Amino acid sequence: MTPRGYLRGVFFLMKDWDDFAALNFDALSRSSSAQAAAMLIEIDRQLQARLDPIAIEIDSGLDSITQDALDGLERIEVDVLDAIEALAKRFSPHPKGRSDD
């Protein structure tokens, strides 16, 4: 993808038009390769600054969901083991050879 195409994609990710004006797309398209590279580096830095907090929030949310799922599975495991133990006691032979029924 050309720098110009990359920039068009970046503009769709910008939150407000002030950023668009600050980048001055027309100036970039007429600038030298070094200036274009410097502007792309700056755009990347700005995008990372905006996207990093979102990524951290998503990661934190996923950690919370994962922990909730693990806690739920642990409760299910305990309930299943308790049920198995209760069934084993119910169907195990009584010491005198009779069941508890």
Image (spheres, rainbow, N blue to C red):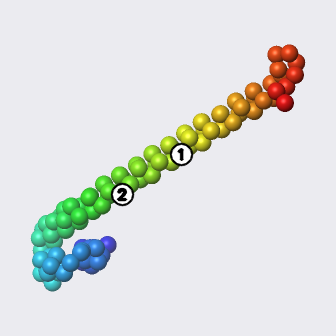
Q: Is residue 44 visible?
A: no
95 and 4: which one is in front?
95
Q: What kind of residue is marked 1?
A: Gly
Tag 1 residue? 72
Give the amino acid at mark 2.
Answer: Ile
Q: Secondary structure at mark 2?
A: helix
Cα gap from disc 1 to disc 2, whole angstroms: 21 Å
Q: Is residue 67 left or right of residue 22?
A: right
Q: Residue at horizontal 24%, vertical 74%?
A: 14
Q: Residue furthest front?
A: 101
Residue 58: mark in rendering: 2
Question: Which residue sits furthest top?
Answer: 96
Of residue 85 and residue 100, the one placed in the foreground of this image is 100
The answer to which image quadrant residue 94 occupies is: top right
Vertical placement of residue 78 versus 56, above or below: above
| Contact flag, marks 1 and 2 (Cβ < 8 Å) | no
Location of the N terminus by quadrant is: bottom left
Q: Position of residue 3 (x, y in %)?
A: 24, 73
Q: Secondary structure at mark 1?
A: helix
Tell which residue pokes out farthest to the bottom in this image: 26
Q: Which of the labelled discs sits on residue 94, or is there none? A: none
